[in-house]
Image (spheres, rainbow, N blue to C red):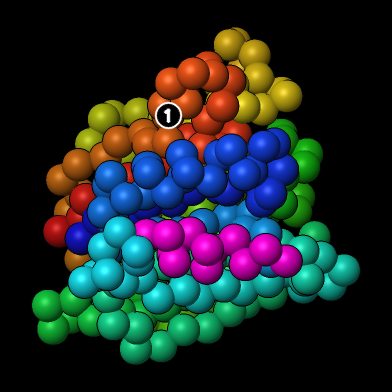
Amino acid sequence: MKIITLNLRHNNDRWEERFPLVVDCLHTHQADVIGLQEVHIPIRQAHIIAEALNQRTPQQPYSVLVEPKWGDTESHEGVGLLTRLPVLEHARLDLPLAERVAQRITLEVDGRRIHIANTHLHHRPIHDESIRQPQIDAVLGWMFDYSESGWLLTGDFNALPDSSTIQTVMKRLHSAYQTIHGDHPHTFPTPLSSEFKPELALTLDYIFYDAERFRPTHAEIIANQPHPDDSTLYPSDHFGLLVDIN
């Protein structure tokens, strides 16, 4: 099974120009499940991506599940999951503080149940986990109360690998990219971002897995190619991740 995570940067920073790059990237990699963050609700961003992908591969259509943030931002932004696999159940969780949300789905793959959660934790302050820590505690409690095993967790955690937030996750799950490559990837920023500086390279995005149930066989950074005629035009201000899981 192939799984992707990608922060879309909602509709900021030249979205109409970026949209074909996003679709091309996702179509190239043919993932079974795609976790999206910063999904812009007013333009049905996840849906128009799925529709574009489905036009190219109508024999393997994606279904779309989007969960908006809560509070004042609920009509603006959320997280989304695209999947080609049968969805048995889905649910959402409003996270403590900062109007963030998590979502989960249960899929049937070769006769076994797989649970996938997707989230986007709060981004500030970068070196203070006082908001992200209770958020990840809530996500993990919600996941493992539902099922003790069979989890994949994707998203933009806005937390560095040595932070308490990520270390809390890694007490229960493993980082797929780290398992394959021995280190975590730099996923932010790309040259699309106004914050881009070559010396600023942060690990914010992850795909985690239950090591008792799954084995990653491949992991790579995606959405890392600019437009051929514009070296600053990337699919997003984040690079994405792709993992093959058995």
Q: Is residue 45 highlighted in magenta? A: yes
For the residue pair 246 and 178, the one nearer the viewer reads as 246
**Residue at the image point whose x is 56% and y is 39% from the top:** 18
* Magenta segment: 42-53
Callout count: 1
Q: Is residue 164 visible?
A: no
The residue positioned farthest toward the bottom in the image shown: 88
| Image location of residue 122, percent across then percent down | 71, 51
Left or right: where does residue 122 sit relative to residue 45? right
Does residue 87 sit above or below 234 in this rendering?
A: below
- State whether the magenta stretch is mostly helix, strand or loop: helix
45 or 194, nearer to the observer:
45
Q: Is residue 200 above or below residue 179?
A: above
Q: Where, by quadrant of the figure, is residue 176 drawn?
A: top left
Splitting the image into 4 quarters, where does residue 221 fall? top left
Is 59 in front, or is 163?
Answer: 59
Which quadrant, please, contains the C terminus? bottom left
Query: Which residue is identified by label 1?
Result: 224
Q: Going by the image, does 108 lie left or right of 121?
A: left
Amino acid type, callout 1: Asn
Is residue 27 covered in magenta? no
* The one of 53 and 106 positioned closer to us in this rendering: 53
Q: Please state the horizontal and vertical placement of residue 116, each as a whole percent of the image.
A: 39, 69
In the image, taking residue 30 as reference, residue 134 lies left or right, namely right
The residue that appears at 58% across and 11% down in the rendered structure is 198
Please state the horizontal and vertical placement of residue 39, each as a whole percent of the image: 62, 59
Dot 1 lies on which element? loop
